[in-house]
Each structure stands twice: as structure tokens, then as C-alpha cells.
Image (cartoon, rainbow, N blue to C red):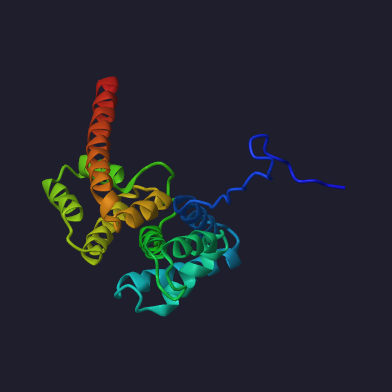
Amino acid sequence: MVTEPVSEDTGKPPETTRQYPTLAFVVRKSVERLQSDYLSENEARCSRAKAILAELRHGISTKSGRYLFAWQSAFEQLFADRFDQIFGEEKAIKEKSFHDITASEKAAYEALSLFACHMQSRKKPMHAQNQTIARAAGILMARRESASLKVRFNQILSSRTDEIRLTHLHGLISLLRSEEIPCDYGQLAADLAALRDPRKKERILLTWARDFSYGLNSHLHDSQETSTTEN
């Protein structure tokens, strides 16, 4: 006979806590799978990934929620990595209808769509874990030595709406793509979701400002060291 473990304090079976995967983890896994398939030498895998990324790119050029095929492509990828557990729990906590779109769903969709733009026609990975979008932007500015990039990044920080911010991010991603500078799309999804929460927004924006400076200064430092070594 199998018996349940009993708590020494209460004499009752201990409560179990459900462990949900984080938004960053699930989006990161989805992007890594798409990236691997896109760069694969297997023609079938590569063709399928190209078709999915094309749908997602088309979606980023339309207003969020309007292009249903892009949403469908996004959710097909996300559900494969237990995304239903994330937004299911989120809706249960907030007592929302399952027909409502949550902050996590919107952020995941936007991150996947931006990745689709970043990966287009690239021959190397454009997703790299632990390199935030802000750090990537700082590296980009160091490479190009253009003051206009700082202005562009400040527009992202000061955007009044999520839609305006997404437009500016899309422009930044195009520049990162041209320089083949990758970023972490799992972290980007988590940040975009947090930016929709007034309690977390300031912290995320401050983190982005710090990471931008870190990326800029660390790249300049590395470049100076390389120049000194060569001389």
C-alpha cells in the first residue's frame, strides 16, 4: 500500500506547488528550435522554418491581433513548449476569460515576430542567450559610432505606448540584423511583458539603459585592447 508523505507539523499531506515554465524559457526554446531548423541542412526543416518566419514577419507589419495567421504560427511554436501553462495560470490568477489576450501572449508574439525579422536571410544565429536587446544596441552604437543610434534607443525608452515601442524596436532589429548582432529573445519577451505592468516598467527601462551603456563601453574597451595588442 502506498501512502502520501505526511508533514511533521500538521500531520497532513504537504501541499504541492505547481512549477510553471517561465515566459523567457518557453520563448527561448521556441526561438532556438526555429533558428536550428532555419539553419539546418535538412531541406524540409529549413523550408518549414522559413514559412513560419515569413508569416511572423508579415504579422509585425500589421497592428497586433489583426493578422491571425501570424498569431497562429506563433502559438503553434509556443504551445509545443508548454506555453499554455504560462498564460493559463496568468488568466486563472487574474480571473480573466480564456478569450482575452494576456501580457505574456502579446509579448511572446512580439518577440517571435521580431526574431523573424532579425533572422531573415542570415547564415548565423541571431538569437544568443544572455545578450539583452539593450546590450546589443550598445554594441551596435560602438561599431557604427553614430549618435543617431542613441537617439533611436532613447525613443524606445520613452515610448508612450506599447505599439510605438514595438515600431522603434522593429527599426532597431533591422539595424542589428545588418551588423549580425544577436540578442536574447527569451529575455526580450519577458521584458516586454513586464513593461505592460506599471509596477515593473521603470525597473525594466532602467535595466535597459544600464545594459545599453554596458554594451557600448565593453565593446569600445575590447576594441581598444585589440588595437593596443596589434600595435
Q: Quadrant of residue 193?
A: bottom left
Instruction: Tell which of 182 and 23 is nearer to you.
Output: 23
Question: Is 37 on the left-hand or right-hand side of 221?
Answer: right
Above/below status of 219 relative to 112: above
Q: Is residue 209 above or below residue 71?
A: above
The residue under the point 39% across, 66% down is: 102
Task: Report the front residue among 171 and 73.
Answer: 73
Q: Residue at x 34, y 51 (%)?
A: 191
Depicted 85 relative to depicted 10: above or below: below
To which quarter of the image does residue 118 belong? bottom left
Image position of 146 (left or right of 85):
left
The image quadrant where one finds the C terminus is: top left
The image position of residue 55, as x and y in percent, is 42, 73
Residue at 34% of width from left, 79% of height from top?
66
Q: Residue at x 44, y 78 (%)?
A: 69
Q: Where does residue 172 sit, x and y in percent of width and height?
A: 25, 55
